[in-house]
Amino acid sequence: MAIDIQWILDDASLARHCADWQRLPFVALDTEFMRVDTFYPIAGLLQVGDGQRAFLVDPLTISDWAPFAALLEDPAVVKVLHACSEDLEVFSRLTGSLPAPLFDTQLAAGYLNLGFSMGYSRLVQEVLGIELPKGETRSDWLQRPLSPTQISYAAEDALHLAEVYQRLQPKLGADKHAWVLEDGAELVANLRRETDPDELYRDAKLAWKLSRQQLAVMRALCAWRERQARARNQPRNRIIREHSLWPLAKTQPDNLVALARIEEMHPKTVRQDGETLLALIKDAGSLPPERWPESLPLPLPLESTALLKQLRAVGQREAERLQIAPELMLRKKSLEALLKSGYPDGPYQLPDNLRGWRRELMGEALLAALEN
């Protein structure tokens, strides 16, 4: 079947089409981008589907994104995406806006018990019975002209995403539809909640093994790495490799030779940033004790596994009752935060990251399972 493809190559055309799209109940959105050597994604193409046609927006020829930002923020138009965390970054970087309301078809598939974390091709096959050609995801989306295969691949994504939405949405019912939108809003909120670089040490590998003085160094290293990655627009591991952070904080080298011996320390990092890192380690390591971070909590012990299983069982029972993919019910981070709030003897408190309908449906049952 030939696809009706319309190119949008200038600001005036984009503004006209955005005005048209704002009269629709929904638009399907997708992006193609490059992110090989950069911290931020570089947009190569934006796709919009209205259920009948595929519109391809060339971000290399557009300078005024205000009309598209208005579309993203229009509460009357549902924005349909699939597994969209990286697409959201593209929109934020390109337009300064994020989609609301957001309907993620991957989440919708989970709420309809079709499968958890389904890839787009598999979902299209499941819902529409269409086998998509092998993806062009890894091809160069910044090249011009794009190849016919790339254009066809991008247009099919936009067209079929709209069709998938039209099939899935009526099957959800009011409650599940609201939950899909609630989870979409949470995805957007998480992206807006940009992590403070000074807090990143809390999630660093093995950081819980460090003393408070060593944590002060880890905090400084993680914060510096994050700020440099953003400022240089380079991947974090290009600044300092992940596996180098812990031995740096643990051993705190004071010369370039010792620095170069750190696990996975790249010679270029030593040449380019070695003196800076040594000064940073020295300054952070000599902070007075009152400025050290608090010790990080230990990981849950193996004995807690049985309790985790009991908590997961609460979610599985509710998933069976609602006919939802069980993995959607309770996230591992929420369960671990709940256990850590009072392990081993309680009392336990529901964590902040257990929100919305999950808290309402399962909060009391989780606490009761722990009390018993």
Image (cartoon, rainbow, N blue to C red):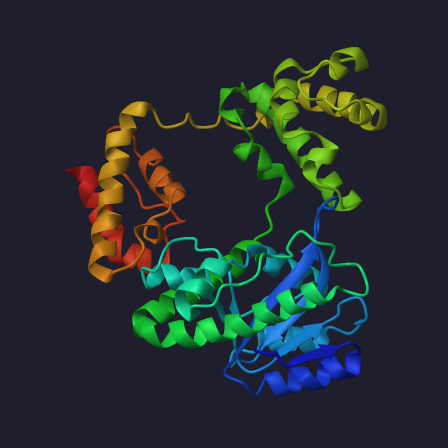
Question: Can residue 69 be seen from the camera position used here?
Answer: yes
Residue in view at x 28 percent, y 39 percent: 348
Q: Is residue 5 above or below residue 188?
A: below
Residue 280 drawn at (x, y percent): 74, 25
Residue in view at x 60 percent, y 66 percent: 30
Left or right for 85, reference 235: left
Where the C terminus falls, by quadrant? top left
Left or right for 66, reference 121: right
Residue 272 drawn at (x, y percent): 84, 28
Q: Is residue 66 above or below residue 12?
A: above
Residue 347 drawn at (x, y percent): 25, 36
> Quarter-wise, where is residue 250 in the image?
top right
Front in this rendered view, residue 302 or 173: 173
Where the N terminus falls, by quadrant? bottom right
Residue in view at x 55 percent, y 21 percent: 212
Front in this rendered view, residue 255 or 12: 12
Front in this rendered view, residue 13 or 162: 162
Left or right for 294, reference 35: left
Residue in view at x 65 percent, y 13 percent: 251
Q: How many marks?
A: 0
As drawn, the residue found furthest toward the left would be 372
Residue 77 drawn at (x, y percent): 53, 79
Front in this rendered view, residue 206 or 355: 206
> Quarter-wise, where is residue 268 in the image?
top right
Question: Can residue 347 be seen from the camera position used here?
Answer: no
